[in-house]
Image (cartoon, rainbow, N blue to C red):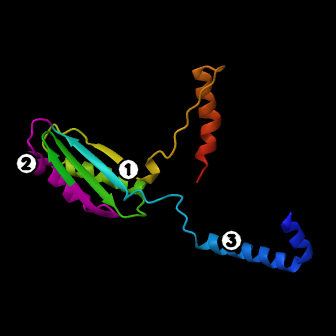
Amino acid sequence: MRFVILALRRPLTVVIALIAVALGSVLALQRMPVDIFPQVGDPVIYVSQPYGGMDPQQMEGYLTYYYEYHFLYITGIDHVESRSIPGQALLKLVFHQGTDMAAAMGETMGYVTRARAFMPAGTVPPFITRFDTGSVAVAQLIFSSPSRTQGDLQDIVLNRVRPLFATLE
């Protein structure tokens, strides 16, 4: 009630105060840091090469070395980390921020094919996994209904709900 009385008695003061609050709000919004998509870490591709019957030193010499040598030529790569354990070679390819990970994945697969030409017979293709902010789920939705079947819910989610989220940027 007091604000109404003040506004009636001193309208110019109230208008100036409202303009000051509006300008302060605009300045605060401009200077406020926005962190909608925080940095989760560098984009990474993992390569896991199984080969049974070899100890870590053999894995390093026969498999890991060739991968490390070839992966250094991938565009946008920052560094390569590797670990050889009995029967398994694990490589972590770390890329610079802003690297096109789809192209990097394609190059990685190409260099894996090249490196496999130097490996012992019977070497199976490695497991290649891409890990970056675009490949990690940021939310999980759970749907339930007392009147609809699971098949009906799945149809609704796949045909109606999922397309709505696919267009989000």
Label annotation for residue 25 = 3
Q: Check whether the beta carbons of the residues at disc 3 and disc 2 lie within 8 A of each other.
A: no
Residue at image location 21% in from the left, 51% down from the top: 115
Q: Total marks drawn?
A: 3
Tag 3: amino acid: Ser
Q: Which amino acid type corresponds to the residue marked 1 in the rendered image?
A: Phe
- Determine which of the numbered discs, if any, sits on residue 131 in the image: 1
What's drawn in magenta, residue-wise? Answer: 52-81
Left or right: residue 168 compared with residue 138:
right
Q: Where 48 falls versus 11 (above or below)?
A: above
Question: For residue 152, what is the image quadrant?
Answer: top right
Q: Secondary structure at mark 3?
A: helix
* Among numbered discs 3 and 1, the one appearing first in the sequence: 3
Tell me which label, 1 or 2, sits earlier in the chain.
Answer: 2
Q: Earlier in the sequence, mark 3 or mark 2?
A: 3
Q: Would you name the residue on which mark 2 appears? A: 57
User: Could you tell me residue 148's position as x and y percent?
Assistant: 64, 21
Residue type for callout 2: Gln
Observer able to see residue 135:
yes
Label 2 neighbour load within 10 Å: few <14, some 14-19, many 20+ = few
